[in-house]
Structure formats: C-alpha cells, structure tokens
Image (cartoon, rainbow, N blue to C red):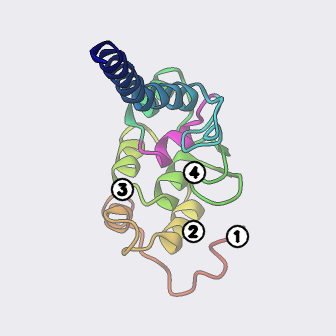
Amino acid sequence: MSNASSRSASLVTRAAWALLAVPPLVLALALVSLLSGTGPARDGFWPRGPMTLPEAVALRDAPAVLELLRRGRDPNARAAVRQRIIHEDDMVATAFEAAILAGRGDMLALMLERGAQPSADQVKAMSCLARPDAAPGVVELLRDRLGATPPADCSDAVRR
C-alpha cells in the first residue's frame, strides 16, 4: 500500500509542478505574441511601421522626435498621423499642430526650440483648438512664446 501511496504522491507532485508552470508559460507566450505583433493585440497602441515626426510628438516620444530631427526631418513639414494617435481617423499635420491637438505642452516647447516656425494662420487656428482644460501648458506657450490668444471668432480659423 505504501508503494501505491508513494506513486500517487509522486503523480500529485508532478501535476502540481506542471500546473505551476502553466501561468508563466502562458504569460511568456502572450508577451512574445504582443511584442512581435502576431497576436490579438497586433493593432495595439504603438503604430506599425516608421513613425512620422507628428506621430512621435503626439505620443510624447522625445527620443524619437530628437532622432527624427537629427536625421533631417523638417519640423514644419506636414506628415501623416495614423488613426487613434490624435484622432479616430488618419490625418495630416505638422509637429506643431500635433503637439497642440494632442495637448502636449512639453512637445510644443521642444518643437519651437528645435525650429518649428508656424505660420500666422497655423497659430490662429491652433490657438482656437487649444483647450486649457485638456492641454496644460499649451495655451500659455502659445501666448507667451508666439503672442497668440484665441480670437473672438474662430469660425474662419479652423478648417477640416
């Protein structure tokens, strides 16, 4: 009987070890799937393919912004911004516009320091879109660095 008990205990021990190994194994497989983009999250948060300067600005990815600028990206050029980074739909924006639309005051300051030179029309339009409640620091930067205040009538400033 003790021989049967020992076999039973050995089976229980093996089963317990196997059960303990399952969660880390599942977690490791899920992580590999997520990072490789082959699993259910392949359309996850981070965009696929090369990131544009406005996308890096909107995502507050300062190292990517600095690298793109170092590689010669024009801080005043308009570039594609994929859906769900700033808006539900794809759009085209400058890094300046992306910083304001995404409410990234720190990125707006960085772009102005690194050569962004928005036109008067852009400044007017963006001062209409910058909301103090959703974009801390953006309204102040527009006012203090560019002398922009939202005009009384923004109807002609913002065109989609």
Circle number at residue 105: 3
Indicate which label's residue lies in the foreground, 4 or 3: 4
Residue on which the image places disc 2: 125
Task: Examine the structure image and report whether residue 119 is included in the region drawn in magenta.
Answer: no
What is the C-alpha distance between the residues marked 4 and 3?
16 Å
Q: Earlier in the sequence, mark 3 or mark 2?
A: 3
Q: Residue furthest front?
A: 1
Residue on which the image places disc 4: 85
What is the C-alpha distance between the residues marked 4 and 1?
20 Å
Mark 4 Cα-neighbour bin, 10 Å: few <14, some 14–19, many ≥20: many
Q: Earlier in the sequence, mark 1 or mark 3?
A: 3
Residue 85 seen in the figure: yes
Mark 3 Cα-neighbour bin, 10 Å: few <14, some 14–19, many ≥20: many
Q: Which residues are magenta?
A: 50-60
Residue on which the image places disc 1: 159
| Amino acid type of the residue that numbered disc 1 sits on in the rendered structure | Arg
On screen, 156 above or below 124? Answer: below
